[in-house]
Image: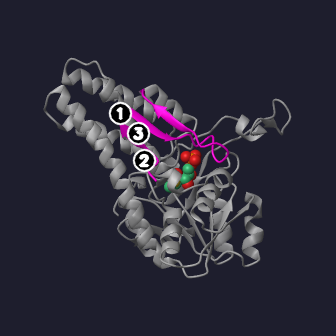
Amino acid sequence: MRMINWKDGTITTPDQTKLPLQEVTLEIKTVEQMAEAIKTLRIRGAPLLGAAAGFGVAIAAYNSKANTPTQLIADLEAAGTLIKNQRPTAVNLFWGVDRVLNKAKSLKGTIEELRNAVILEAQLIADEDVAQNHAIGKIGSVLIADGDTILTHCNAGELATVEYGTALGVIRAASEAGKKINVIANETRPLLQGARLTTYELKRDGIPVTLITDNMTAHVMSKGLVDKVIVGADRIVQNAVFNKIGTYGVAVLAHEHNIPFYVAAPKSTFDLTSKADDILIEERNPQEVTHIGCQQTAPEGINVYNPAFDATPLKYVSGIICETQIYYPPDYPTFRQGKI
Ligand code: MRU
């Protein structure tokens, strides 16, 4: 099922903050609404953020009152800046804005032609994401054996992409190929993407899933209950993989227990001009840590540190599955030269 749709200047997408208890469709008609949806994680997950970024610029094109192509480009740039300012870590957000903006800037034409080209480019990003996720699933499923139990962290599923998912795309493809797969989903504090979203979509698809809290990972691994780990990524740099906070710990634990740790992500998530120390890790509202939902669980005014992502050094990554191939550790040195 498509997670983001464009029709006549309106974007529809599930409000992910309401899942799994309510299935609410969000309607987005302005760039400001898109920015709010990104900031609050109504729309989330790196590949979906890339598509949302493209559609956000497309909304600006659709709504623009510009009289000249130059004015239109200025409106698109303002929209792009607003969208980019919402979250700093997932590179797809920046990639999606730049791809659509660059398309507009590369064209000489009337306002109408530019507007249509921008909307088409945004739709192309979304279509390509679907194809890439299916390719990731097919390529990655060779790593999965019949009967495997796979642990995943956060949600790198259909809800984090335009369709099918990256890490969960690999699991889906293996399951569709007839392999019996069990999934262990880490709940993923503080915003519970694993508990709320990964279990929701796997249960819907009939793929067996067991929910654990994040602090149970070491225990289940030590008991031999995990065959492989597969996670998604928000940004892959020369020396590390950025993903949801807690991923680094899972990778270290997998290494200690000799469990393969795979990352599944499209090439739009690669940022090989950067190293881990260059990347700004988003820090979110302390209330996400002091509360569970609306329930306060910590004393009033307590100091909180709430980074949303961490960086897993490549030495812990057994393979990176993308839409064209699987990169293994001997390939990683080329990442330092900006090559994939
Ligand atoms: O803060 P979120 O929910 O946007 O974080 C999402 C993740 O960390 C995902 O694992 C990542 O974006 C990969 S999604 C295919």
Residue situated in front as seen by the camera: 234 or 121: 121
Label 2 environment density (alpha carbons within 10 Å; few <14, some 14–19, many ≥20): many
Above/below status of 268 relative to 73:
below
Name the kind of residue labelled 1 in the image.
Answer: Val
**Label 3: which residue?**
53
Q: Earlier in the sequence, mark 2 or mark 3?
A: 3
**Label 1: which residue?**
57
**Residue under the image location 56 percent in, 44 percent down:** 281
Name the kind of residue labelled 2 in the image.
Answer: Asn
Q: Earlier in the sequence, mark 2 or mark 1?
A: 1
Q: Position of residue 169 (x, y in %)?
A: 49, 64
Q: CA distance from mark 2 to mark 1?
A: 14 Å
Residue 322 visible at all: no
Name the kind of residue labelled 3 in the image.
Answer: Ala
Label 3's element?
helix
Over which residues does the magenta segment extend?
1-30
* Circle number at residue 92: 2
